[in-house]
Image (cartoon, rainbow, N blue to C red):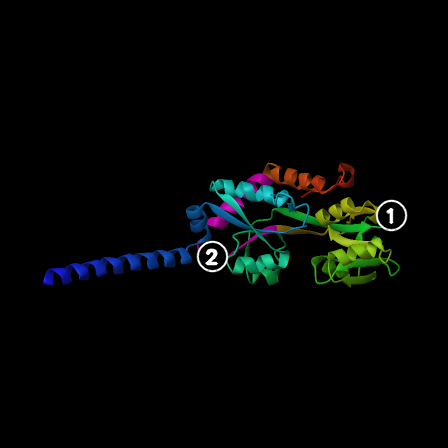
Amino acid sequence: MTTHLTRRASALGLAGLASFGIIGSARAQANESTFERVTRTKVLRIAALPGEAPYFFKDIATGEWSGACIDIAKGIAAVWEAKLEFVESTYGNSVLDLQSNKVDLAFALNPTPARALSIGFSKPVLVHPFGVVAKKGFTPASWDDINKPEVRIACDLGSLHEVSARRFAPKGTITAYKNRDDAILAMAGGRADVDVLAAMLGITAIAKNPSLGTFRLLGNPTVALPSCCGLRREADTRFKEVVDAYIDMNRGTGQIRDWLIQGIIKSGARPEDIPAELSF
């Protein structure tokens, strides 16, 4: 009897240790950093944004993703010999997805102070110049050219496009629409003379609808804002350090510019639609 009880107690003890080990492992995984998780799982989770050309394209028939940000993501994943996992999102939701640990990286985010309260940022993937989609026959070259009451300026509400319009063209007749699509519709419907947009967005808008006019970079001053990868702010900084090193190397060699230009062309733009002075 004593031997039987001893064996049973021993078995229960081993089971308890096993359970403790499983629980301890689960807790360790829950607390691991992004660097540790990607290294362990060989999976890099990214926020993928449908319809956001030239950064993201999704083939409806195959479900495959492509675009400038996908090329960058593939390169970062390759550092770990990891595969990509796509989580469909939006610019706004990608910040929430980072906070809730649904994704490891979000792309094409301007590092605004409000966003920096919630997430961290990589080094700039590109420095994104601003300009306007201008109606046919109108060829503004500077902010002064649109800073006139007779110029009807469209922009999307609450965006950096609106901030730029109100700061550099306050005398223009500015209408902030609910979103970028509504601002473009205002242009298409003849209710606006220009739509303030960052270069990549403006060029792809023209590619989709050439009848809108042309995209014009504006100077005096040149307005250009960094576009970065968003990531979680963590005590373990190794993941950010790897991403930063990847960005520095591929910006320096011109590879990121090539991917951006390929994305613009894939969206339907012609090489002549890309301003010669455009730089990233």
Q: Which disc number belongs to residue 234?
A: 2
Judged left or right of residue 124, residue 6 is left
Dot in front, 1 or 2? 1
Say if 41 sits above or below 15 in the image. Answer: above
Q: Position of residue 106 (x, y in %)?
A: 57, 52
Residue in the foreground of this view, choosing between 277 and 232:
232
Task: Please state the extent of the stretch shown in magenta in the rendering.
Answer: 228-251
Q: Amino acid at mark 2?
A: Glu
Circle 2: element type: loop
* Residue 211 included in the magenta stretch of the image: no
Q: Please report the residue visible at 55 percent of the width from the left and 58 percent of the height from the top.
A: 97
SS under mark 1: loop
Horizontal and vertical percent position of residue 120:
54, 56
- Residue visible at 67% across and 41% down? 263
* Quarter assignment of residue 29: bottom left
Report the residue that reaches farthest toward the front.
1
The amino acid pointed to by label 1 is: Lys
Q: Which residue is mark 1?
A: 136
Question: How dense is the environment of label 2, judged by Cα within 10 Å: few (below 14), some, or many (20 and up)?
Answer: some
> How crowded is the residue under tag 1: few (<14 C-alpha within 10 Å), some, or many (20+)?
few
Tell me whether circle 1 and circle 2 mark residues in contact (CB < 8 Å).
no
Q: Which quadrant is home to the N terminus?
A: bottom left
Residue 97 appears in view:
yes
Q: Nearer the viewer, residue 271 or 125?
A: 271
| Alpha carbons under labels 1 and 2: distance apart | 49 Å
